[in-house]
Amino acid sequence: MAEKGDPIFKHAHLYSLEEIGEISRQAGLSPVEECGTLTTGPLSPDAGGGVTGPSAKTGIVAIKLVKQLRK
């Protein structure tokens, strides 16, 4: 979508789960909650908003991060 000049996504930088993990570790953050959704294509008749665990098959991932306490 972004490559084709989509008016919204052309400004987005999308990260893989691995990149999110690395960025959050570098910032001193730890995940406490994760979920994912959009497991079908946007034009699929089965498209729905079911919530599941994040994976490479989910189109949207939400991760709650907290600051790690120093010991």
Image: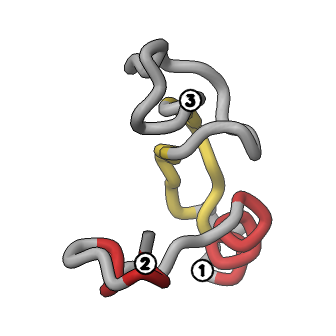
The quadrant the N terminus occupies is: bottom left
Depicted 18 relative to depicted 2: above or below? above
Residue at image position (43%, 78%) is: 2
Mark sitting earlier along the chain (2/1): 2
Q: Is residue 46 left or right of residue 39?
A: left
Give the label on residue 6, or none: none
Please tell me which residue is depicted at 33% across the width and 84% down the height of the picture: 5
Per the image, the residue denoted by label 3 is 40
Ranked by sequence position, the earlier of labels 2 and 3 is: 2
Q: Residue 11: image x %, image y %?
A: 31, 86
Q: Amino acid at mark 2?
A: Ala
Judged from the image, the secondary structure of the residue bearing numbered disc 3 is loop
Q: Position of residue 21 (x, y in %)?
A: 72, 64
Residue 41 as seen in the image, left or right of residue 18: left
Q: Is residue 62 above or below residue 44?
A: below
Question: How many angstroms separate mark 1 from mark 3 (CA)?
Answer: 32 Å
- For the residue pair 53 and 63, the one nearer the viewer reads as 53
Disc 1 on helix, strand or loop?
A: loop
> Which residue is disc 2 drawn over?
2
Measured as percent of width and height from the top left, residue 62 is found at 47, 44
At 62% across and 38% down in the image, what residue appears?
58
- Residue toward you, 37 or 35: 37
How far from the left and from the top, in percent, is residue 26? 69, 82
